[in-house]
Amino acid sequence: MAKQFTDANFAQEVGSGVVLVDFWAPWCGPCRMVGPIVEELATEYSDRAVVGKVNVDENTEIPSKYGIMSIPTLMFFKDGEIVEQVVGAVSKEVIAAKLEEILAS
């Protein structure tokens, strides 16, 4: 299951290793399409990466800090640094390929 990231725990959660963050909101149609994919990846990559979600309605600091203008936005972090970003609904294959690439680097 994907972790729930908040303004309070975000810095600690993305500080080390490979982390995928899904910025979303309950009212966002494309977010609802990406949500189940993110949950699947959280299970599949549980031993290699952290996968979490930020509800942009409940947590406004972090999306503002990273300039999130459209959702869903997927950000890939490695040791606290953004290494990749995808905006919009994309397939599981695209997200998994990016995760694999980052894990291999």
Image: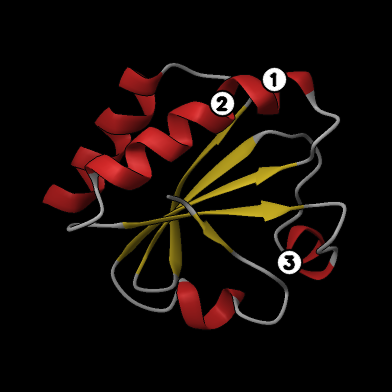
Disc 3 marks a residue whose amino acid type is Ile
Identify the residue at horizontal 38%, vertical 22% (top origin). Answer: 92
Residue behind mark 2:
34
Viewer-nearest of labels 3 and 1? 1
- Residue 45: tell me if it is visible: yes
Sequence-wise first label, 2 or 3: 2
Q: Are marks 2 and 3 in contact (CB under 8 Å)?
A: no
Q: Residue 30 carries which label?
A: 1
Q: Do the residues labelled 1 and 2 touch (CB within 8 Å)?
A: yes
Q: Position of residue 60 (x, y in %)?
A: 85, 63
Q: Residue furthest left?
A: 104
Sequence-wise first label, 3 or 1: 1
Residue 17 occupies quadrant: bottom left
Disc 1 marks a residue whose amino acid type is Pro
Helix, strand, or loop for circle 2? Answer: helix
Viewer-nearest of labels 2 and 3? 2
Crowd tier of the residue under label 2, counting other residues whose Cα lies within 10 Å: few below 14, some 14–19, many 20 or above: many
Q: Residue 43 carries which label?
A: none
> Could you give the CA–CA distance between mark 3 and mark 1, rounded to whole angstroms?
20 Å
Identify the residue at horizontal 76%, vertical 58% (top origin). Answer: 63
Q: Which residue lies furthest to the front in this view?
A: 1
Numbered marks: total: 3
Residue behind mark 3:
62
Left or right: 30 with respect to 28? left
Q: Are marks 3 and 1 in contact (CB under 8 Å)?
A: no
Crowd tier of the residue under label 1, counting other residues whose Cα lies within 10 Å: few below 14, some 14–19, many 20 or above: some
Disc 2 marks a residue whose amino acid type is Val
Left or right: 22 with respect to 82? right
